[in-house]
Image: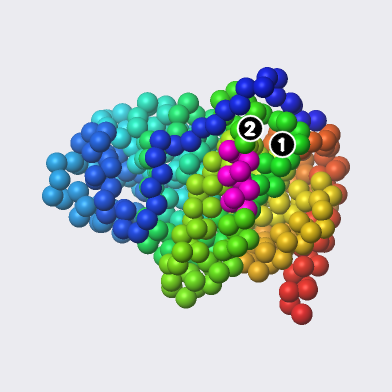
Amino acid sequence: MATTVQSTTRAFACPLKYIQGPGEFDRLESYTNVFGSHVLFVIDGFLYEDLKARLGKAYASTSSTFTALKFGGECCAEEFQRLATQARSGCDVLVGIGGGKTMDTAKIVANELDLPLIIVPSSASTDAPTSAMSVVYTKDGVYVKNVRHKRHASLVLLDTEIIAKAPIRFFVAGMGDALATYIESMANERSDSPNLIGKGYRRTKASMALSKLSYEILMADGINAKMALEAGARTEAVENVIEANTLLSGLGFENAGLSCAHGIHSGLTALPETHKYLHGEKVAFGIVCQLVLENGPDHLIDEVLRFMVAVGLPCTLEELGVEANEANVRTIAHQTAVENKLIQSEPFLIGEEQVYNAILGANALGQKYRAAARR
């Protein structure tokens, strides 16, 4: 059963600044020089050569210098040690550029070494940029734990030209992550569970409003935004969804809390075949599981599943490379209900068998909506 907060104290936390717009990457030096003249960049591997070259041009005629390191690919203890060794050699600010695992790793290193942190997402694939949390894995990609940091980034900077050019799959996965925010926040509201700020506090009305706004923007602009990106256009709908995926969802989940959808994500990581799928894709299937577990209202289930099918989010195990056999489903259920505690913020007692049945029910429901879309 969920642990209810033990006081009436409310709390809300966020980055010091959030800036979103086209061309902002090439203005990075104007943001980093506030903290000092030497910058350490940690950059996603597949972006490393291109962005390092762009940084060279951006910093060429300035008094600032930088060192660029290629991210090793996993948010794990071995990578923390490697990057911390480099950071200790002397830098004034740490900048993490890339996807969720790159950013989460940069958060850990910056907090351990007490360095100012700037986060620069390369896509709108997760709501990780604005949070003071990192999801830690083994070097083989199996979920280990969530880590809460003592402070947020000093700046979250989004260059929407870069984000709009990222694979559309990343953008869609970000919508999966953001879609969970309001649904999970409502579960936490019903159970009065502590949020993810420090020791855990009650949610503010602001956090619930931001979570709801994230959901509303997805419903209003999500399909049109995907269509625009497919046509090579960066429209107002695209900008709105980038904000929903990143800022609104990020502030919403941290200040209101996580529950079943992210618990199922963690359970899925116990199966190696899911490691090639994105965070938001696994969370998306977790949303279906949560709606089944809670026996959610028909109108919400219908709206969510229709949206997921329309934008291409996974709503079945098969779409995550998982065969729906008993062994696999029980592995996911055990990891979700026993090894991970996120699902326990649901407003009722949850056991492994309930999760097992919810996964089977969600898979059947997803198959029904997929089949209807093909007709």
119, 6: nearer the viewer: 6
Q: Secondary structure at mark 1?
A: helix
Query: Magenta stretch: residue 226 in it?
Result: no
Q: Nearer the viewer, residue 75 or 34?
A: 34
The residue stretch that appears in magenta: 206-215
Tell me what residue is drawn at x 58 percent, y 42 percent: 252
**Mark drawn on residue 189:** 1
Q: Of marks 2 and 1, which one's residue comes earlier in the chain?
A: 1
Magenta segment's dominant SS is: helix
In which quadrant of the rendered image does the N terminus lie?
Answer: top right
| Discs 2, 1 touching: Cβ within 8 Å | yes
Q: Is residue 211 found inside the magenta-colored segment of the image?
A: yes
Say which residue appears at 62% left-offset and 53% top-offset: 215
The quarter holding residue 143 reads top right
The reply to whether residue 4 is visible in this rendering is: yes
Compared across the picture, whether 357 is left or right of 38 comes to right
Other-residue count near label 2 (Cα within 10 Å), few / some / many at <14 / 14–19 / ≥20: many
Q: Residue furthest top?
A: 7
What residue would you read off at disc 2? Answer: 203
Name the amino acid type tagged 1: Glu
- Report x, y in % for residue 87: 32, 33
Instruction: State the image coordinates of residue 239 (x, y, percent, origin top left).
Output: 46, 59
